[in-house]
């Protein structure tokens, strides 16, 4: 697959190969999820989709995988993507395909969020891979750019271990909100309309995130953990996944703390979770998009790319609203310009996933 270095333009068979591969691999993983639901599904997600709907989706993915893989084989001299796609789609069918019986045997002691991973890989890559090729900011970068395997591993680990991460992230907020209920301080945010609650959550979350994020940049012992995120020299939809586990847990736990204390409705919190996940991904994409006056109102890729610039440093900390940086004096968005170089000066962070996991602890001593 990685040896397929031919042209990546429309009509070259590259997109169809990639689509065939993603859908084939996705179908294969989906069949595994159906086979072992007690081990491979996320508790929160289980109630969110119906088995019949997923079975229909799987059948569609299998048909599309065969179609696009065949197209790749017909169009492209290198058939690697298409053949790999067909192999995984065939394995998925041998293992039961879309007609597979789901025999749920109660809860296993630990869950791996393979369903969460498959849904996100398929959805995000189907949206962003074509968009990044159609409107590239750095056209030479390619989809399989330097460091993509490291970022891919971050993506996989954070999705598969989603329940474990959520547990640690929620722990401080649940403890504090039990001790100090919102009703007791007379705040009635639950009574507000849903949209108002979501906007208020975005505001409170982003102000908290701003200061936690700035703290990670400012405090000597904290910076190495966040430096991992800044170590990437290539931005795309996958680059935002590069986050040290300590960075993820500390940042998310502190953001959730005020949200739980205020006692927002669960639905509003879920809507915000989708927004923040989508925006955090979008802010990193390798796409040349200038949104004019809107860039002053909401965070866009150009704003966040400047946060990753080698120079100037310590600018643009917000995730939702750039004017928070304006208020606190860290706003940097020169007209229509994008940063030349991304990453950290001197490249102090090692390249590989496990070495990055250990690096901040070694640096502290
Ligand atoms: Zn940062
Ligand atoms: Zn970032």
Image (tube, rainbow, N blue to C red):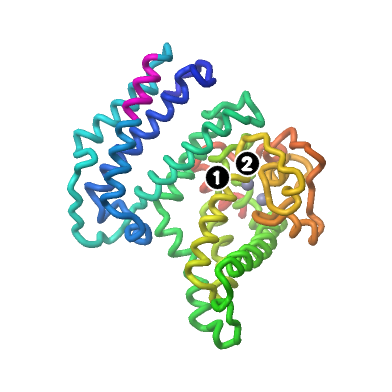
111 above or below 96? below
Asked if disc 2 is less than 8 Å from ligand 2, the answer is: no
Residue 61 horizontal side relative to residue 138, left or right: left
In this figure, what is the number of numbered marks?
Answer: 2
Q: Kindly identify which residue carries mark 1.
A: 242
- Residues at discs 2 and 1 in contact (Cβ within 8 Å): yes
Residue 211 falls in image quadrant: bottom right
Foreground of the two, 204 or 296: 296
Question: In the structure shown, which secondary structural element does the residue marked by tag 2 occupy?
Answer: loop
Identified at 30% across, 34% down, the residue is 62
Residue at horizontal 43 percent and vertical 44 percent from the top: 156
Q: Quadrant of the C terminus?
A: bottom right
- Foreground pick, 321 / 236: 321
Q: Which residue is mark 2?
A: 231
Residue 69 lies in the magenta-colored region? yes
Q: Is residue 262 above or below residue 146?
A: below
- Horizontal relation, residue 21 to residue 139: left or right: left
Residue 179 painted magenta? no
> Residue 166: percent from the left, percent from the top?
45, 61
> Residue 148, how many percent across, how many down?
52, 34
Query: Which is the main secondary structure of the residues drawn in magenta?
Result: helix
Q: Position of residue 53 (x, y in %)?
A: 30, 49
Q: Which residues are magenta?
A: 65-74
| Front position in the image: 249 or 260 | 260
Residue 349 in view here = yes
């Amino acid at each position: 697959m990685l040896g397929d270095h031919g042209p990546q333009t429309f009509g070259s068979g590259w997109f169809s190969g990639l689509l065939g591969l993603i859908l084939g691999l996705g179908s294969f993983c989906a069949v595994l999820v159906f086979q072992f639901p007690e081990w491979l599904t996320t508790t929160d997600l289980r109630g969110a989709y119906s088995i019949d709907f997923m079975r229909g989706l799987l059948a569609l993915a299998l048909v599309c995988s065969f179609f696009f893989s065949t197209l790749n084989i017909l169009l492209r001299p290198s058939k690697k993507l298409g053949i790999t796609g067909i192999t995984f789609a065939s394995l998925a069918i041998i293992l039961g395909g879309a007609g597979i019986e789901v025999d749920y045997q109660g809860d296993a002691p630990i869950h791996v969020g393979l369903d969460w991973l498959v849904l996100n890989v398929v959805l995000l890559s189907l949206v962003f891979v074509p968009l990044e090729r159609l409107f590239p900011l750095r056209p030479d970068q390619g989809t399989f750019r330097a460091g993509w395997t490291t970022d891919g591993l971050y993506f996989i680990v954070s999705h598969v271990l989603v329940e474990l991460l959520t547990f640690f992230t929620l722990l401080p907020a649940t403890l504090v909100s039990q001790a100090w209920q919102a009703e007791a301080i007379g705040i009635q945010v639950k009574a507000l309309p849903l949209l108002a609650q979501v906007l208020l959550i975005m505001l409170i979350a982003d102000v908290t995130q701003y200061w936690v994020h700035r703290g990670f940049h400012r405090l000597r012992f904290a910076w190495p953990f966040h430096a991992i995120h800044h170590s990437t020299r290539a931005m795309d939809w996958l680059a935002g996944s590069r986050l040290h586990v300590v960075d993820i847990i500390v940042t998310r736990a502190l953001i959730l703390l005020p949200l739980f204390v205020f006692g927002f409705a669960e639905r509003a919190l879920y809507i915000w979770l989708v927004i923040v996940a989508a925006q955090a991904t979008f802010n990193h994409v390798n796409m040349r998009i200038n949104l004019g006056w809107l860039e002053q109102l909401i965070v866009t890729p150009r704003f966040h790319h400047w946060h990753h610039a080698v120079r100037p440093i310590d600018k643009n900390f917000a995730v939702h609203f750039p004017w928070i940086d304006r208020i606190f004096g860290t706003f940097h968005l020169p007209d229509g310009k994008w940063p030349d170089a991304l990453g950290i000066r001197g490249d102090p962070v090692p390249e590989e996933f496990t070495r990055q996991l250990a690096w901040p602890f070694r640096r502290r001593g």
